Amino acid sequence: MVGLIDLVEKLTTPHPLDRYLELVRPTLTLRQMRAEITHVRRSAVGSVTLTLRPTRQWAGHLAGQYVQIGVVIDGIRHTRCYSPVNTQSRRDRHIELTIKAHPRGLVSNYLHENAIPGMVVDLAPASGVFHLPPERPDRIVLISGGSGITPVLSMLRTLATERYQGRVLFLHYNRSPEWVPHRTELEAIAMQHSNFRIEFRYPELQRDPHFGYDELEKLAPWFHLAQTYLCGPPGLMKAVRTVYEAEQLADRLHSEEFTLAAAPADPATAEGTISFSGSGKSIENTGASLLEQAEDAGLSPAYGCRMGICFTCTAVKKSGCTRNLRTGELDADPDQPIQLCINAPVGDVDLAI
């Protein structure tokens, strides 16, 4: 069958067979996976929840992983990463995504405003190492803030579906109750499972809602024995890591970044020229990430997350030195694949895009 498909695709060059099949039905594909939006719900302030029916290639996800979806906006296909919020054992194979509309988020705002049942999006297989282990720990702490709730919500739902008998603390930070997606369901889970403790904290409404050792000790005095899963904004991530490092529990803390914590670019110290030899363009270095500077040069390199977790924006650096925006490490090796979203040029750099 694979050989026959390859032969047909050679005959349909320059377009792959899926490009012709989608003219008949957008979800009729042989190789590329897609999903149709079946339900759209806007129940929490600033976010939209989409239910997707994937094509036959979908193999499921582990609670905590993310997927890439692609949408066409003004004729350009954009991809982004989102974590499913549904249980990993959902029987109908549908995927549920809760997407927060960020102020400068092109795709998130587009979906928040325009998603309707029947819309078809591209879909990539689930990926990521942030997920529950196959053998569930006896005690689990789930900590999230803002849109970081999505991967840990999938974990909580999965544990509830499995009738997990261990102890669970679910601690979520947000602006106010209206901003918490699936809050009603979370409260129902807490009522149905006496071993689950679900707590919300609202910095704008409470006197002292910030994370610290005393707060964690009060809510889960057994946290030293737990495996902890963390996803949220940089301030919350730093506060939690500080506690766990002080308690020598760093090996029990598992985290997922959904924003890139990097030092801001300083144009005054930037020097050199970035050459995009694949397109014959060049631009003076501003100190920003290679992805941002490629876009400033009028190029449209593929990317999924801008956080360095999906590897979609990988390109070959032909020459020059770059600095990793997360670690500060320098890399001067030529002809190496490099992630555009988390690297900035140090002097002259040539990219094969």
Image (cartoon, rainbow, N blue to C red):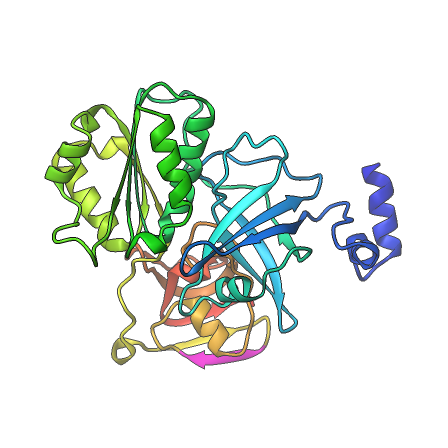
Question: Considering only vertical position in the picture, is 29 above or below 284?
Answer: above
Most common secondary structure along the magenta stretch: strand
Q: Residue at x 44, y 38 (%)?
A: 154
Q: Identify the image quadrant of residue 329.
A: bottom left
Q: Residue at x 36, y 18 (%)?
A: 165
The foreground one among 90 and 245 is 90
Q: How many marks?
A: 0
Question: Considering only vertical position in the picture, is 177 above or below 276?
Answer: above
Q: Identify the image quadrant of residue 289.
A: bottom left
Q: Residue at x 22, y 35 (%)?
A: 250
In the image, taking residue 299 as reference, residue 266 lies left or right, namely: left
349 part of magenta stretch: no
Where residue 316 appears, x then y in whole percent? 52, 60
Asked if residue 311 shows in the view, the reply is no
Magenta-colored span:
280-284
Asked if residue 153 shows in the view, the reply is yes
Where residue 123 appears, x then y in whole percent? 62, 49
The foreground one among 171 and 342 is 171
The N terminus: image quadrant: top right
In the image, taking residue 352 as reference, residue 30 lies left or right, namely: right
Question: Considering only vertical position in the picture, is 241 above or below 348?
Answer: above
The C terminus: image quadrant: bottom right
In the image, taking residue 155 as reference, residue 231 lies left or right, namely: left
Q: Identify the image quadrant of residue 139.
A: top left
Where residue 85 appears, x then y in whole percent? 47, 42
283 part of magenta stretch: yes
